[in-house]
Image: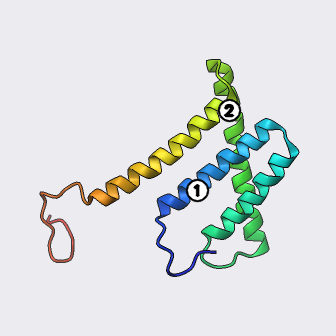
Amino acid sequence: MTDANDTRRPEQDAAKLGLVVVGEAAALQSGDEAAMDASEANIRETVDELVDVPLTDRQEEVMERLAQAGGTLTAGLSGALAARTGTSVDDVLEGAARSIVWQERLTEEREDAGPSDIGRQDDQDGQQPA
């Protein structure tokens, strides 16, 4: 569970959850029971880390099922794309994971660079003049 002093950005949490979904897809594609068990444990841990207050048992189960459904969808689409392009499913899933990490890094770099409209003036409340 997160605390009040947590400094993570929402994009970091979204990236983490995205990687969990790709991990679930990889486990489903592998058909390996141990990988699927590890993925389910990873989903539970990640959900617990991302919430600010304890979830009810039902809320936690719904979150886990959403992540699993995302993994199932990702596995199916990755399999179809791999078959269509003649690449391996592992390569497609690896590309998806790289894209998630890259998108999060780009967001972080943009935030670190500051506002992109530096030449425009805001009023004292931070609002753009009409």
Q: Position of residue 101 (x, y in %)?
A: 51, 47
Please tell me which of labels 2 and 1 falls first in the chain.
1
Type of the residue with mark 1: Lys
Q: Position of residue 4 (x, y in %)?
A: 52, 81
Q: Give the number of marks.
A: 2
Residue 59 placement: quadrant: bottom right
Cα distance in 3D space between marks 2 and 1: 19 Å
Q: Secondary structure at mark 2?
A: helix
Vertical arrangement, residue 56 with respect to residue 87, above or below: below
Give the quarter of the figure containing the N terminus: bottom right
Q: Secondary structure at mark 1?
A: helix
Vertical arrangement, residue 107 with respect to residue 60, above or below: above
Q: Position of residue 9 (x, y in %)?
A: 46, 65
> In this orientation, which residue lies closer to the viewer: 127 or 68?
68
Q: Position of residue 39 (x, y in %)?
A: 76, 52
Give the quarter of the figure containing the C terminus: bottom left
Check if mark 2's residue and mark 1's residue have beta carbons within 8 Å. no
Query: Where does label 1 land, which residue?
Result: 16
Report the side of 98 relative to 84 (left or right): left
User: At x 62% / y 72%, what residue is drawn?
Assistant: 51
Residue 41 placement: quadrant: bottom right
Type of the residue with mark 2: Asp
User: At x 74% / y 63%, what residue is drawn?
Assistant: 44
User: At x 56% / y 79%, what residue is drawn?
Assistant: 3
Query: Where does label 2 land, which residue?
Result: 90
Report the side of 46 relative to 112 (left or right): right
Report the side of 96 relative to 23 (left or right): left
Circle 1 Cα neighbour tier, 10 Å, few/some/many (<14 / 14–19 / ≥20): some
Q: Say how the picture is coloured.
A: rainbow
Vertical arrangement, residue 128 with respect to residue 55, above or below: above
Circle 2 Cα neighbour tier, 10 Å, few/some/many (<14 / 14–19 / ≥20): some
User: At x 33% / y 54%, what residue is drawn?
Assistant: 110
